[in-house]
Amino acid sequence: MYHIEVRNVTLTYDTPGGRVPGVRDVSFSLAPSEFLCIVGRSGCGKTTLLNILAGFLTPSEGEIRIGGKAVAGHGLDRGIVFQDFAQLFPWRTALGNVAFGLEMKGVPKAEREAIAMKQLELVKLEKFARSYPHHLSGGMQQRVAIARALAYSPAVLLMDEPFAALDALTREEMQRLLADVWRETRKTVVYVTHNVAEAVFLADRVIVMTPHPGTVKAELPIRLSRPRDPLSVEFLEYQKELLRHLTEPAAKA
Amino acid sequence: MNASGQRARSARRAVFTLAVAAALYELMARSGLFPAALVPTVPTVASTLTAMLLDGTMLRHAAYTIYRLLSGLGLAIAVGLPLGILMGRFRAVEHFFLPLVSVLMPIPSLAWVPVFILWFGIGNTTTILIVFYAATFPMLLNAWTGVRSVNPLWLRAAGAMGARGQVLFWKVIIPGASPFIITGLRQAVLRAWIAVVGAEIIAASAWGLGWVIYDAKEFLNADVMLASLAVIGGIGFLFERLVLGSVERATILRWGMVQTAKS
């Protein structure tokens, strides 16, 4: 039984220059609690695909099924974390941001703040609950964004390069934190990145996408025990293999 | 640095700037280049101002002006803010009102004074409507722009968390547009002052700061004119610092949506 099924999804953009294929005939599935990374260079359609999963874009063909049901539009069954720090509402405290989804669900104030506080503890930011986003570092803002996406208990977490704008040290710290959060919450995760090491560190399985049009080139299960050691030989072998898939079409073109 | 210390420092800075400006004026007034009756010294203006404050006339002039200013401004906010927001949200509203706004906006509010006098006579109604006319457009245009420049990422994030319609509007779009809305309010206040004093010069009878300035011209009372100008500046300063400044500190500054100058 799959949790998420992506079936023959195609999306073409209508631009002033004509119809541009975004993704073509993409299919894959996720088991419950699986961590899937989608890796590819800029323009390979990985973000387009995530936006289709999130319901911000409607595919021209094909369908998405979550828990066996076809989905259209966005819903509280999916939590979303974007790359841009500016995704947080600057006029709300960290706690207010995390509680937003619960507020939309109609959860009473005391209850939603208690839940939001738990989520902030999960990302180790309980001390900054009353801070406004502009007083938090980029890494902290992204942790608030993760807590916000988890707070209303979506079954699926969709992440679009959430750590791409962070410095390397903070990024590694965030990856370890996300691995812990995933182990504790057992969410099904679709994580888009262009960073091969990040994909090998986080994923149960990696999908490699290539551009023009965006298609799935390869799928690679990562059979490494957790926590993973980014300096181990096996880890580097996986990285090499992913890089090989990513660079091949570029060499041809 | 605590808040009261910061306020004291900001007050000291303001006093310093104003003292320098007053000293330069005083030098000019005492230079003997101009007739003393036309360019009265600072002490002369100050004593006229004190006398007018003590006998209550200046307060009454100021009260009339403030009443007209706030009434017109209130109307402008009540109309300009919602209309600008609706124009930013709904294309049909934008399409209908934008041509009207484009035609009316460039007409100086004072050009309407003679027309309004014909329609409404001399007095409060005309003055208030002129203020309303002048202040509506900056409010409307900023609200319109503000709504359209709300970060799409906030709308996406809020939409993904189930925010729709009214809730999305009050909890995301309005705070998201707040830097523009506050700027609109500032510009509306500025335009309202220009309009109220101008309209009083033409269309008020017996009371109002604009009227007293114009009336003083008949008797070459430059000290009365300057005292009234000082009162306008003083009220404007207090309004800007106390009202608009507090609104800004409580919202967009606190949220980091605008910053104070760094150096």
Image: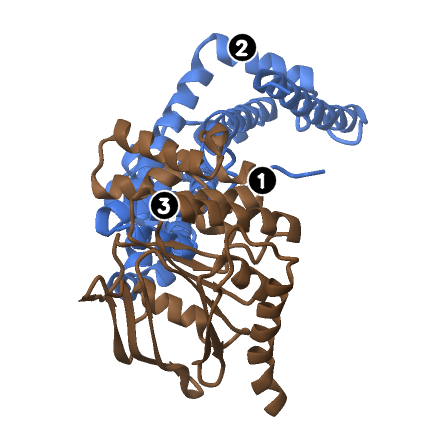
User: Element type at marker 3?
Assistant: helix
Chain identifier, colour blue: B
Q: Residue at x 45, y 87 (%)?
A: A17
Q: Which label belongs to residue B51? A: 2
Q: Chain of mark 2?
A: B
Residue in front for this viewpoint, A177 or A48: A177
The image position of residue A205, as x and y in percent, is 44, 66
Q: CA distance from mark 2 to mark 3?
A: 75 Å
- Disc number lying in front (3 or 1): 3
Residue in front for this viewpoint, B251 or A52: A52
Looking at the image, do the residues carrying marks 2 and 3 touch, with CB atoms under 8 Å apart? no
Circle 2 packing at 10 Å, graded few (<14), some (14-19), many (20+), is few
The image position of residue A232, as x and y in percent, is 64, 59
Residue B139 sits above or below residue B209 on the image: below
Q: Amino acid at mark 1?
A: Gln
Identify the image quadrant of the N terminus of chain A. Answer: bottom left
Q: Chain of mark 3?
A: A
Q: Amino acid at mark 2?
A: Ala
- Disc number lying in front (2 or 3): 3
Q: CA distance from mark 3 to mark 1?
A: 38 Å
Q: Which residue is mark 1?
A: B259
Q: CA distance from mark 1 to mark 2?
A: 43 Å
